[in-house]
Image (spheres, grey):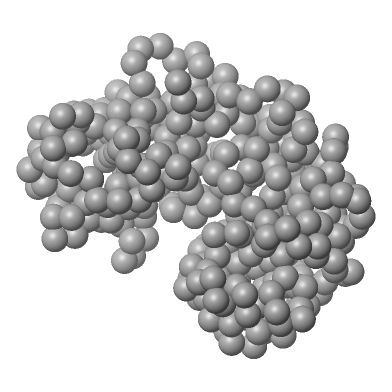
Amino acid sequence: MRMSPLRLSRRKLLSCSLATAALSLPAQAGRITDAAGGTVSVNGAARIVSIGSSVTEIIVDLHQARRIVAIDSTSAGIDGVKGLPDVGYLRALSAEGVLSQTPDLICATSDAGPPEVIDTLRQSGLAFALIPHVPTVDGILQKIALIGTLLDSDTAAAALAEDCRHRAEALAAKVRSLSGPKPKVLFILSFSDGRLIAGGSHTGADSVIAMAGGSNVAAAMSGYKPLSPETLLADPPDAIVTMSGAGIAPDRQAILDYAPLASSPAVLHGAIRAFDGASLLGFGPRTIAAAGDLADFLHTPATP
């Protein structure tokens, strides 16, 4: 039985917060062990290139936005950094674009890429921290702890972690209180020329669906992959979730016209909604609120 990422014991959640235990030892301001196992030390970084929406929003929430000099495209919609230079998409970075910002700290989530660019940045001689990207509430708290230590903002990080923990627990309690079967959810990453790419297990989409009290109809496959028409016909979704944004959101009418979904409860009742991708799948503090919005959407009766 797959456990929801929010069904965490209080002890386990607290273990991820700065208030109880440091995630990198020895505990020392400005020094962490990052996702690649390297020791990263920085003292008073004043020029940060922030890569990954969750990293950027945590830095902003720690009241350190003034240190950020450039961001990646997934961070562009975050208040406090709008209008800053954009070094490109999280998974399609160029070393030249990042280094041209003359940072004294590069802070990126561990799903940043491509690998050869990450290797170049690690070998640049600059402080470079890969923050673990784990799509769970624990993962959010871990990011906060590491970034708080790295930026010598332990007090603010402890407060932010506690706020996130409280909100996660409230959402978990709300989901547990719901009666009836879990709504069956289809997350569509992209859809064109009749080829539907869905979020399977071991994805942020699968994790956030579970957080919101839903059941992922694509959970039998792993990752973001094409989903067969046969799967949709055998297990039609009650709700369909996509990402919003120009060039990102699948065409709603194309989804409505797709024959394998035509008789699904999601299409018949118009239960299709686009969410901001960085908030929903970034797994920073905003993801908890986005999961709450998703829960409201999934558990509110749809009207055709």
> Left or right: 33 with respect to 71?
right
Tell me if residue 274 comes above or below residue 69 in the rendering. Answer: above
x then y, percent, for residue 68: 71, 71
Pinpoint residue 5: horizontal percent, then vertical percent: 55, 31
Query: Quadrant of the rendered structure where residue 248 is?
Result: bottom left
Q: Is residue 57 visible?
A: no
Residue drawn at (51%, 64%), measured in percent from left and top?
74
Q: Nearer the viewer, residue 76 or 212?
A: 212
* Left or right of 12 in this view: 54: left
Residue 157: % across, % down = 79, 47
Residue at the far front in the pictured view:
37
Quadrant occupied by the C terminus: top left
Where is the N terminus found, in terms of image quarters?
top left
Q: Is residue 37 left or right of residue 236?
A: right
Residue located 47% across and 37% down the image: 207
Residue at image position (13%, 55%) is 194
- Residue 129, compared with residue 145, is above or below; it is below
Q: Nearer the viewer, residue 268 or 121?
A: 121
Q: Nearer the viewer, residue 101 or 21?
A: 21
Residue 276 or residue 80, whichever sits in front: 276
- Say which residue appears at 25% left-offset and 29% top-offset: 238
Relative image position of residue 258 (x, y in whole percent): 11, 46
Residue 144 appears in the picture as rendered: yes
State the image quarter where residue 83 is shown: bottom right
